[in-house]
Image: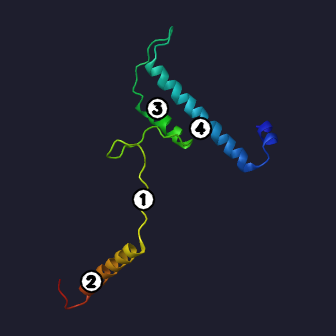
Amino acid sequence: MQRLKEGIDDKEEQISFLSTVARLVVLAWSGAVITVAYVNIPGMPKQDFDVTFISSVFVSTLTTFGVQTAQNKNGNGNNKKQEPRQMSPEEMKAVVAALREEEESKLDLDKPGTTA
């Protein structure tokens, strides 16, 4: 720990470094457990257990490093993400007007003596 404090001056950098090391240890551990579950290692009995939890830990740790293990395909089999469409000013005005009209109709129904 003392070497870490000497090598990295900033407290936030020390915490970031330790966080990265911890995530790498978890990633290596979960990867090793998954490997042992599927690979026959000579001199070691076959380990037979459910790796669902360990797999979720592995994938979750990978995502903390920005790695995506699977992507959803859109309708045409293309993995490219569709960018959200920018609304035109006219469309925005129409949406705002519709919301105001809906809100006003709700307020009118709250008044005594009005019916739907």
Per the image, label 4 sits on a secondary structure element best described as: helix
Query: Residue 93's x, y, as percent?
Result: 38, 78
How far apart are the alpha carbons under marks 4 and 3? 14 Å
* Mark earlier in primary sequence (1, 3): 3
The residues bearing labels 1 and 3 have C-alpha atoms spaced at a distance of 35 Å
Q: What count of labels does the image hold?
A: 4
Measured as percent of width and height from the top left, residue 19 is found at: 64, 42
Residue 83's place in the image compared with 91, above or below, is above
Q: Residue 92 carries which label?
A: none
Residue 99 picture location, percent across and down: 33, 77
User: Badge 1, how many Cα within 10 Å: few under 14, some, many 20+?
Assistant: few
- Which of the 4 image quarters holds residue 26? top right
Residue at image mark 3: 54
Name the disc covering residue 105, or none. Answer: 2
Q: Which of marks 2 and 3 is nearer the N terminus?
A: 3
Marks 4,3: beta carbons within 8 A: no
Residue with the mark numbered 4: 23
Q: Do the residues labelled 1 and 3 touch (CB within 8 Å)?
A: no
Give yes or no for contact between labels 4 and 2 (Cβ–Cβ under 8 Å): no
Give the labeled residue for mark 1: 84
User: Which residue occupies 43% across, 49% down?
Assistant: 81
Identity, as a three-letter code, of the amino acid under mark 2: Ser
Give residue 96's quadrant in the image.
bottom left
